[in-house]
Image: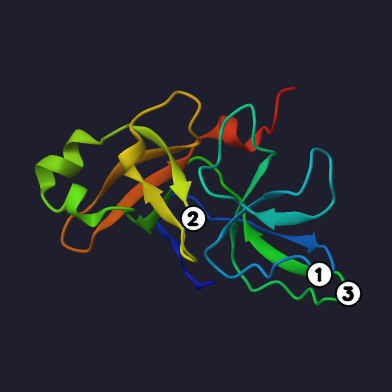
């Protein structure tokens, strides 16, 4: 996996971090990877899967990892996570950079709610998916020259599954 897939672009408020447990033998979490609770009410976190976060289905989104997790095969560890609060804008590569290589194409995606793509070892913002009211990240801009999308994490994604 790669570090710094997701970065904080802008923040109008201080971004708090909090330390969470990572289970022994869980996949390492690297800075810049989005994380969620491993299960509803769990004490440990894992990284998001492909095509998440889905509001009402995905467990509670905790935020974006700020550090590398310290877990090993034999011992639980910790990871510091940036807590997703209103006023924080994140930056991440688009899944298909050719879809946002002009300002007009990027502008057409404004306010679309989409998901992360993790079909390789790198998280990207899947602008290909199109808007869905249950998608947990919202596009708020980007940079066509760099092939990146700016987004927020929708508050409802931090509530967890509703079932």
Residue linked to disc 3: 75
For label 3, count other residues whose C-alpha is less than 10 Å away and answer few (under 14), some (14-19) or many (20+): few
Q: Please tell me which residue lies in front, 108 or 117.
A: 117
Pinpoint residue 105: horizontal percent, then vertical percent: 15, 42
Instruction: Give me the C-alpha separation between circle 3 and circle 1.
Output: 7 Å
Helix, strand or loop at mark 2: loop
Kindly indicate the quadrant of the structure image that contains residue 97: bottom left
On screen, residue 20 versus residue 100, left or right, reads: right
Pinpoint residue 115: horizontal percent, then vertical percent: 45, 41
Residue linked to disc 2: 118
Q: On the rendered image, what quadrant is the N terminus found in?
A: bottom right
Query: Is residue 11 something that shows in the picture?
Result: no
Tag 3–tag 1 contact (CB < 8 Å): no
**Residue located at (64% from left, 30% from top):** 57
For label 1, count other residues whose C-alpha is less than 10 Å away and answer few (under 14), some (14-19) or many (20+): few
Pinpoint residue 162: horizontal percent, then vertical percent: 71, 23
Question: Mark 2 vs mark 1: which is more N-terminal?
Answer: 1
**Residue located at (51% from left, 73% from top):** 3
How many dots with numbers?
Answer: 3
Query: Is residue 137 something that shows in the picture?
Result: yes
Q: Please tell me which residue lies in front, 147 or 50.
A: 50
Above or below, comparing residue 82 to residue 157 in the picture: below
């Amino acid at each position: 996996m790669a570090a710094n897939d997701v970065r904080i672009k802008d923040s109008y408020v201080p971004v708090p971090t909090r330390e969470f447990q990572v289970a022994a033998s869980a996949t390492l979490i690297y800075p810049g990877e989005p994380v969620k609770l491993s299960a509803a009410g769990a004490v440990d976190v894992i990284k998001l899967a492909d095509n998440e976060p889905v509001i009402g289905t995905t467990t509670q989104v905790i935020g974006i990892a700020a550090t590398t997790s310290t877990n090993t095969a034999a011992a639980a560890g910790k990871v510091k996570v940036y807590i997703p609060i209103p006023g924080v804008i994140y930056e991440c590569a688009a899944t298909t950079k050719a879809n946002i290589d002009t300002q007009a194409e990027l502008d057409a995606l404004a306010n679309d709610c989409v998901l992360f793509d993790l079909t390789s070892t790198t998280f990207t913002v899947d602008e290909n998916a199109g808007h869905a009211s249950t998608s947990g990240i919202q596009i708020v801009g980007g940079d066509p020259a760099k092939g990146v999308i700016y987004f927020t994490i929708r508050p409802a994604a931090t509530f967890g599954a509703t079932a």
